[in-house]
Amino acid sequence: MFKKVLIANRGEIAVRIIRTCRELGIKTVAVYSTADRDSLHVYLADESVCIGGPQPSQSYLNVPAIIAAAELTGADAVHPGYGFLSENPGFAEICQACGIKFIGPSPETMLLMGDKAKAREVAKKAGVPVVPGSGVVKTVQEALREAERIGFPVLVKAAHGGGGRGMRLIESARDAETQIATAMAEAEAAFGSGEVYVEKFVENPRHIEVQVIADSKGNVFTLFERECSLQRRHQKVVEEAPSPFVTPELRRELSKAAASIARYINYEGAGTVEFLVDGKGNFYFIEMNTRIQVEHPVTEMVTSKDLIAQQIAAAAGEELDLSQVKLNGHAVEFRITCEDYRSGFRPVPGKVEKLLLPGGFGVRVDTHLYEGYKVPVYYDSLLAKLVVWGETREEALKRAKRALSEFVIKGDLKTTIPFHLKLLENELFLRGEIDTKTLEDKILPEIT
């Protein structure tokens, strides 16, 4: 097992990793920007190193500074969390060259699955259905020809990234050129490459993902599915496990497909295989995220397994045994962000003057907030994740309503707690009758 892990991240995920490392008896190193000098992860870690200015390019994406911090402190491993450098094969390769273990898959695997078009080919070879689409395209005209070949409506997606950036739904040829150009510009700005691919738009799908854990001994395990359909602008807002739509038979099929892809590429570590599922239960591979997910706590709540601990163990070369894990109850995660939902989810960061966290049976809060903390303007707006568990979905949602009513974050910032309370009054959500457009098309018009 590792002696010291450097966490190349910030916020709640850095705190999350530090806590697991402490339970495992592993020393931790926090890296931080000048804007994060007073962040909670800096206080909790055994050591901390400032790696640059407030902009991500100056700090959390500053590979030389992070490697120097690892060497300076004697860290023998780096955990990238999610976002930032977590799916950067170049960073993983540099860690490898410096004798520092990257807690994640190999650079070659990351490079393969990070290329969305190549990942689709992997899925096909592994016998998993994919949405009809193109290979990587580099020009607007090339993408337009592919869109016309596939048939509208289509999705244009960044070939080298995710999270909704560089993604556009194009319903007809009328404004296709403008939309494609916009998607390419966004992809270039977010991922350093304007390359995209085009795929057929599946009408009213659910977004279902399967958690994968694999070790270096060839063992591959799947830990059930997560429902991630409640999205705004392709960004997940609420996630739950298991999906209220997925039957035991479909769960077996999705798990088998996810495991097939992981085995085909000799995957190692924690990863997520994502699918679109239509109303008839037909599913299509869309991508694989080669990292821990923001929503991993819902899987932890229904399996009683610490996924960060499993991820670290796999990276340390230990053999995993998750074959006896059973699905227990239902869990839902609510992303609490510093946004004003009544103003189009406009970011409103600020100082936390008062903080009251909910508790009680089946309630978990992952956060880096504390009273007096000033939320920086430079990073993602995620403040906390409220995760609730119940024996049934109905019980979990009732518990969520109670927990959200207790959750207080006051100051000159806005949060999405009021939005989530409104969501818990919506009948479509309560019945689990959702797809990837339900929030934007049906729920938000009612509650804003």
Image: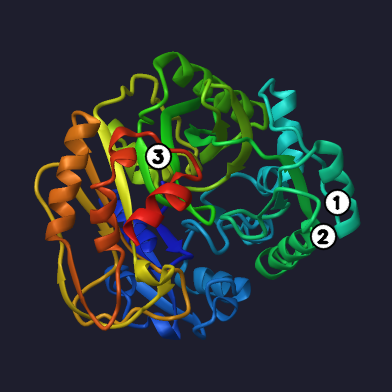
Mark 1 vs mark 2, CA separation in Å: 7 Å
Number of dots carrying numbers: 3
Mark 3 vs mark 2, CA separation in Å: 45 Å
**Up-down relation of residue 90 to residue 398 (above or below):** below
Say what secondary structure mark 2 lies in. Answer: helix
**Up-down relation of residue 383 to residue 136 (above or below):** below
The picture places residue 209, in percent across and down from the top left corner, at 49, 36
Q: Nearer the viewer, residue 243 or 224?
A: 243
In the image: residue 24, left or right of residue 259: left
Name the residue at the left extreme: 360
Q: Using a 10 Å C-alpha cutoff, classify the residue at mark 2 as few (fewer than 14 neighbours), some (14 to 19) or many (20 or more).
A: some
Query: Of the residues shown, which amino acid type is indicated by label 1?
Result: Leu
In the image: residue 4, left or right of residue 87: left
Q: Nearer the viewer, residue 428 or 108?
A: 428
Eye-nearest disc, 3 or 2: 2
Quarter holding the C terminus? bottom left
Query: Of the residues shown, which amino acid type is indicated by label 2?
Result: Glu
Query: Of the residues shown, which amino acid type is indicated by label 3?
Result: Gln
Residue 177 is marked as 2
- The residue where tag 1 is placed is 144
Mark 1 and mark 2 in contact? Answer it, CB < 8 Å.
yes
Q: Residue at 46%, 27% (x, y): give it.
A: 222
Eye-nearest disc, 1 or 3: 1
Q: Using a 10 Å C-alpha cutoff, classify the residue at mark 1 as few (fewer than 14 neighbours), some (14 to 19) or many (20 or more).
A: some
- The residue where tag 3 is placed is 310
The picture places residue 434, in percent across and down from the top left corner, at 42, 38
The picture places residue 377, in percent across and down from the top left corner, at 43, 81
